[in-house]
């Protein structure tokens, strides 16, 4: 199955999309990889979903990526004696370490780390930002705040702290248990929530030990100031616009989305745009015009993937949501102005052999108007570096490593094929042509460009470019 678009689609699974028939339909509609949200998924269900996805994968013969999204710390208020209170603008409201039920003047905050880190002037956002407090007096036992934006407040509502650098790990005991269960099951990507600093990513990687790739979710203002370090430590980035829009002014989110997309692309790391992309399709079979424009913007920006959350997990129209996103991607990439926009955003190649080879291969492929750019890759790094260049022809990545193939499911423009490794350079060239011919990327008589690392089978050695002609049976020769 060959996609007609370069941008990838990440679909979240849930109550509306957890059986074999539905996951198969989502894949056929355009989903390239699937997200399992551990906030709502017990281990047994996670294992069941992974097994079902692998079943679909084997029936289509195409690697499908699986991303497990860890919940991260959940900061919440305690309980109120009457279940709820009404907070008025300008009133004083105290958060404290007293475990007794709260009232209209105070409530328990069961997070001593927040009380220790809060400083006067820091904002506290309750219930997804519906209520806003400003700290006026702080100590390790309590925080006296003034209500800036009032409203109804009830038991266990969430607390966000956009101004406060919390000395807490991005991983809770639940996350550690979820992570180990996911790794044993053999998933491909881990999405790490509540990232504030590069050390959060490094901590997760020490636990993972190379068994999966790490995608850092950027949803905290504290991460914005340390973005370069976080990108360097991560394997990919997710722009989690929902939580980011709670803790930052909404008008800042679009520009941050563009900045993060370009920074990730410059670093050669995949970037996923997430949250509320087709939100109305949870209830409606068609999206709003604004949502279509939002998805299209991510495509024009050159993001690697766009994500569906509740639309595919719990909505009434999961297949329609994926199909709609697929059509938007195809239409944008057919736009005559699309290539010029992508080219204008292309970063200069890094001063490495791999980047120099990838840039040269892209230039040759476009100058000669070649129908495909083929990468032989063991770890997937060659295909990632070529995708960074956003070449005009499709990228066909051939790998003997199924794990690398699954991880490449999130990377822009990559059609991945898992095949036995090449015996030598002649075999590599010949079979590259055969695979591209079989999958409909080239016709007999056309030329292709092949990028690889020599010696073969050694990760991270991208150092060779070949141009070959495809014969009548699909085999290529120099």
Image (cartoon, rainbow, N blue to C red):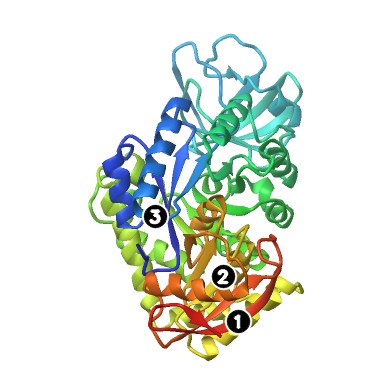
Q: Is residue 345 visible?
A: no
Q: Earlier in the sequence, mark 3 or mark 2?
A: 3
Instruction: Of the two numbered discs 1 and 3 on the same chain, state the one appearing first in sequence.
Output: 3
User: Is 358 or 122 nearer to us in this picture?
Assistant: 358
Could you give the CA–CA distance between mark 1 and mark 3, rounded to whole angstroms? 27 Å
- Say which quarter of the image contains residue 473: bottom left
What residue is at 30 percent from the left and 56 percent from the top? 29
Q: CA distance from mark 3 to mark 2?
A: 19 Å
Residue 354 in the image, given as x and y percentages of width and height: 70, 71
Residue 435 drawn at (x, y percent): 44, 70
Q: Is residue 9 above or below residue 360?
A: above
The location of residue 93, given as percent across then percent down, is: 60, 24
Name the residue: 59% across, 53% down. Answer: 237
Q: Which secondary structure lies at badge 3?
A: loop
Q: Which residue is identified by label 3?
A: 61
The residue labelled by disc 2 is 375
In this figure, which residue is indicated by the disc labeled 1? 466
Question: Residue 371 shows which numbered tag?
Answer: none
């Amino acid at each position: 199955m060959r996609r007609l678009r370069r941008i990838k689609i990440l679909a979240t699974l849930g109550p509306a999309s957890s059986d074999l028939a539905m996951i198969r339909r989502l894949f056929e509609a355009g989903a390239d990889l699937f997200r399992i949200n551990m906030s709502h998924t017990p281990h047994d269900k996670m294992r069941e979903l992974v097994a079902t996805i692998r079943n679909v994968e084997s029936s289509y013969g195409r690697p499908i990526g699986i991303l497990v999204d860890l919940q991260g710390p959940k900061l919440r208020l305690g309980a109120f004696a009457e279940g709820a209170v009404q907070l008025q603008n300008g009133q004083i409201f105290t958060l404290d370490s007293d475990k007794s039920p709260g009232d209209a003047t105070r409530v328990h905050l069961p997070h001593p780390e927040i009380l220790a880190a809060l400083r006067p002037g820091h904002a506290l956002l309750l219930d997804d930002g519906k209520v806003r407090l400003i700290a006026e007096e702080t100590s390790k036992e309590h925080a006296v705040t003034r209500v800036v934006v009032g409203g109804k407040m009830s038991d266990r509502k969430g607390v966000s702290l956009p101004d406060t650098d919390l000395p807490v790990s991005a991983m809770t005991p639940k996350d550690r248990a979820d992570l180990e269960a996911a790794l044993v099951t053999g998933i491909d990507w881990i999405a790490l929530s509540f990232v504030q600093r590069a050390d959060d990513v490094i901590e997760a990687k020490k636990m993972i030990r190379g068994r999966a790739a790490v995608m850092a979710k950027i949803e905290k203002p504290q991460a914005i100031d340390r973005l370069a370090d976080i990108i360097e430590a991560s394997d990919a980035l997710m722009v989690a616009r929902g939580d980011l829009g709670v803790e930052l002014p909404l008008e800042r989110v679009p520009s941050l989305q563009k900045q993060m997309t370009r920074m990730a692309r410059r670093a050669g790391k995949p970037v996923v745009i997430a949250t509320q992309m087709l939100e109305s399709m949870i209830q409606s079979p068609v999206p709003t015009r604004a949502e279509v424009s939002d998805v299209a913007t991510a495509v024009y920006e050159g993001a690697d993937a766009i994500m569906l959350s509740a639309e595919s997990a719990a909505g009434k129209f999961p297949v329609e949501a994926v199909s709609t996103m697929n059509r938007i991607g195809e239409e944008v990439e057919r736009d005559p102005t699309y290539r010029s926009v992508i080219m204008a955003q292309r970063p200069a190649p890094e001063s490495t052999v791999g980047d120099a080879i990838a840039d040269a291969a892209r230039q040759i492929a476009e100058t000669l108007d070649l129908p495909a750019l083929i990468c032989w890759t063991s770890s997937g790094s060659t295909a990632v570096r070529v995708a960074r260049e956003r070449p005009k022809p499709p990228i066909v990545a051939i790998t003997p490593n199924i794990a690398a193939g699954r991880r490449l499911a999130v990377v822009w423009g990559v059609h991945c094929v898992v095949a036995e490794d090449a015996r030598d350079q002649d075999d590599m060239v010949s079979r590259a042509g055969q695979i591209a011919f079989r999958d409909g990327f080239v016709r007999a008589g056309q030329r292709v460009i092949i990028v690889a690392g020599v010696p073969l089978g050694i990760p991270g050695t991208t150092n060779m470019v070949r141009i070959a002609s495809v014969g009548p049976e699909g085999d290529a020769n120099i």
